[in-house]
Amino acid sequence: MNKATGYEGINFNGIGRYKRTIWSFEQEWRFHLEIFPKPDTKQKDEKFSIDQLTELIDNRHSLKQELTHFDLQIDQGCFNKMQITLGPKIEPGDKEIVESLIERYNPKARIHSSNLTGSIR
């Protein structure tokens, strides 16, 4: 529990946020979503307890998943500036798939080969 705010919960802010500086040349953004169903509560605005959240997390693999996908709105300006860096060991067929997806969904996206292409096994 955070004594200053009285907030009781699990802080997911650091998960997937940081990586070693050796990979800084990748200049990538990472997004991590944790989506859990809200436990049944008596009132619409009622907050659920840390115990309920812990139970959700502990049992997340055995819960019936009704949510099959989660759509996010992406700012069109950002979408138009998309840059995709292919992995250094990408197979030709996979590269073709990426190129086809770009052509269909975001022709303005730029595609790059990794700086490590040809230098690792």
Image (cartoon, grey):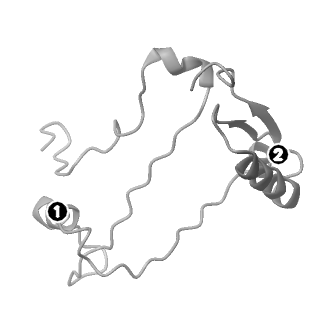
In this rendering, is residue 65 above or below 1?
Answer: below
Residue 119, horizontal then vertical, whole percent: 63, 18
Element type at marker 1?
helix
In screen coordinates, is 13 left or right of 120? left
Q: Which residue is mark 1?
A: 58
- Identify the residue at image location x=59%, y=67%: 71
Name, please, the residue furthest toward the top. Answer: 22
- Identify the residue at image location x=88%, y=55%: 103
Neighbor class of circle 2 (other Cα within 10 Å; few <14, some 14-19, many 20+) is few
Place residue 2 in its image quadrant.
top left
Q: Amino acid at mark 1?
A: Asp
Q: Which residue is mark 2?
A: 80
Q: Amino acid at mark 2?
A: Asn
Q: Calculate the distance from the C-alpha at mark 1 to the C-alpha at mark 2.
A: 39 Å
Residue 31, horizontal then vertical, whole percent: 50, 45
Residue 42 numbered mark, or none: none
In this rendering, is residue 27 above or below 21?
Answer: below
Mark 1 vs 2, N-terminal side: 1
Residue 66, horizontal then vertical, whole percent: 40, 82
In screen coordinates, is 17 left or right of 11? right
In this rendering, is residue 16 above or below 103?
Answer: above
Residue 12, horizontal then vertical, whole percent: 31, 45
In screen coordinates, is 76 left or right of 56? right
Place residue 115 in its image quadrant.
top right
